[in-house]
Amino acid sequence: MSVQKPTYSFGDLPLEAVETGTNILVTGPALGGIRDLVMRMLLRRHAREGALFIAADVNGREALSDYETLGGKVDIARMGAVDCTEDGVDDGSCNVHAVGSPADLTGVGIEFSSLYERIHANGAARVRTGVYTLSPFVVYAPVKSVFRFVHTLTGRIRTADGLSVCAIDPSAVDDKTVASISQAFDGKVELREAGGQKAIRARGLADQPDGWLPITLDS
Amino acid sequence: MRELTVLYVDADDSERTATRDALVADDAISVVDATSVATASDAIDRERVDCVVTEYDLPDGTGLDVAARLRETAPDTPCILFTNASPNLIDTGHHEDVVVEYLPRDMPDTRESLVRLVGNVVTERSQVGYPLPTKEDERLAALEQYDRPGTAAADAFDRLTTLARSYFGVDVAFAGLVDAHEERFLACAGADWETLTREDSACTHTLLEDDMLVVDDTHTDERFEDNDRLDELDIRAYAGVPLETPRGATVGAFCLTYDEPRAFSDEDLTDLRLFAAEAMDQLELRRRLNERSDDPETEATDGGTTR
């Protein structure tokens, strides 16, 4: 009898489950449904999974409420958000921790690590982490800090059996920078829209379907 | 496993003793301790440490001041804030760029978690400020075979870079090997650079390229636009070809730099590849000679990454 490896699964999205410790970069245009896609990839599949958002384009509260709209079950002991927007505020009622600026990657990293530890200590053996999106960090912070932050996050996910789903908008960041950042991830999920149909394609991740697969998302 | 040296900074004697004991209980860790930003800075200047663990509140500043000092001196070294100070009490204002790990001290079994985290941030190279090649460990193992005493003294590299500089009409032509933390120049025509930290070196990015890296203007490339060190060295344009061993490990780069934005022609880039190939051949020949002198019984074979 073979023992099944623990994995993170993605419900009805056209993606196969991935092993624990996997870091995925999601690329696609901001208005093409990428936020919806990231949120769906973060949906908790059972009560002992935790979820953590690093919100740079929207505030933390909004991220959690969008998550709920998509069917995510909110459990504030095992969920939380790091709010990196300029006017973000702490909100204990939904476990939102504000940093105040996407340029403050030291602050983002500290809040992320702290929240990850707490969620884990509250009984979430597995934690899904989403970053929406990396683009403001690249725009506002020095590129060296962005690499430090990305390595810190992906390293923690690998060693803690987590999952990360990090979005980047290639129209906001140049291709060469996206290529260097993608090196820190195990693989990519690309999103595109052609002829009115949205589709995703997985690259570099084991056991995934080939080619572009149609998907329905809210933009 | 190699022993790790951890610098541990805390002014509280009993905390320091308890945490120190927990760290050294792991046979693979040795601890240097400090009680303030000033003594921690001295330790960072004095010796190479693998990881820094620091309390946030220190008598003459904060743990982030220690991290900032570390980023100046040994920028790749990971730093962990190990503290009771909750994130909202930590003032990141002057240190938005340092990026550190954070472990709350009030968690259950927190010292055991710290030992694990120290191991993880070192093996994962968690806080390096640049992209890493996919097989970095293999690359570094391969580099050891090429980076031997005397290699940098070889006249062949001086001749090659001197020729390249005048042939392409650039400010500087150089051949460099990129190790775990810095690039060291085998030869450098037109400047007297000896080393450059990896996060400041354009060659760090060249290592990840299959063919070459060409930057016409560092000020308009997101990867380099905020790199002050390149400006200090008058590098505004750059072309570099990876030095790849016969087994496919990239150990360094052969490069040209110029102090103004500049486009390199296709002919120039084709010729630059030839210079790089010649430099790599020189390195490979030296590796084989070294292999023979190390062990006269062994027939020299193809070098590179170990399988």
Image (tube, coloured by chain):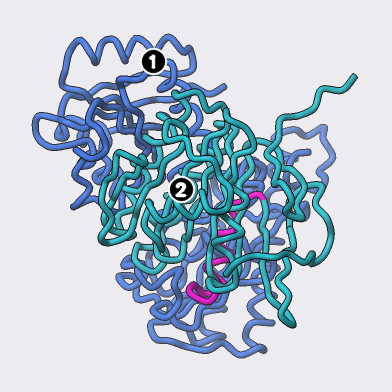
Visual hue assigned to chain A: cyan
Q: Name the chain under label 1.
A: B
**Above or below, B233 relative to A114:** below
Quadrant where the C terminus of chain A is found in the figure: bottom right
Residue linked to disc 2: A53
How far across and how far down the image is residue A143, in percent?
Answer: 41, 62
Q: Which residue is at a point 53% across and 71% down the rendered structure image?
A: A30
How far across and how far down the image is residue B116, in percent?
Answer: 48, 23
Residue linked to disc 1: B108
> Relative to the observer, which residue lies in front, A46 or A141?
A46
Q: CA distance from mark 2 to mark 1?
A: 24 Å
- The blue chain is B
Left or right: residue B168 compared with residue A80: right
Kindly state the secondary structure of the residue where label 2 is placed.
Answer: strand
Q: Which residue is at a point 23% across and 50% down the rendered structure image?
A: B95
Q: Look at the image and tell me whether residue A208 can be seen.
A: yes
Q: Which residues are magenta?
A: A170-186
Q: Which residue is at a point 39% across and 25% down the rendered structure image?
A: B5
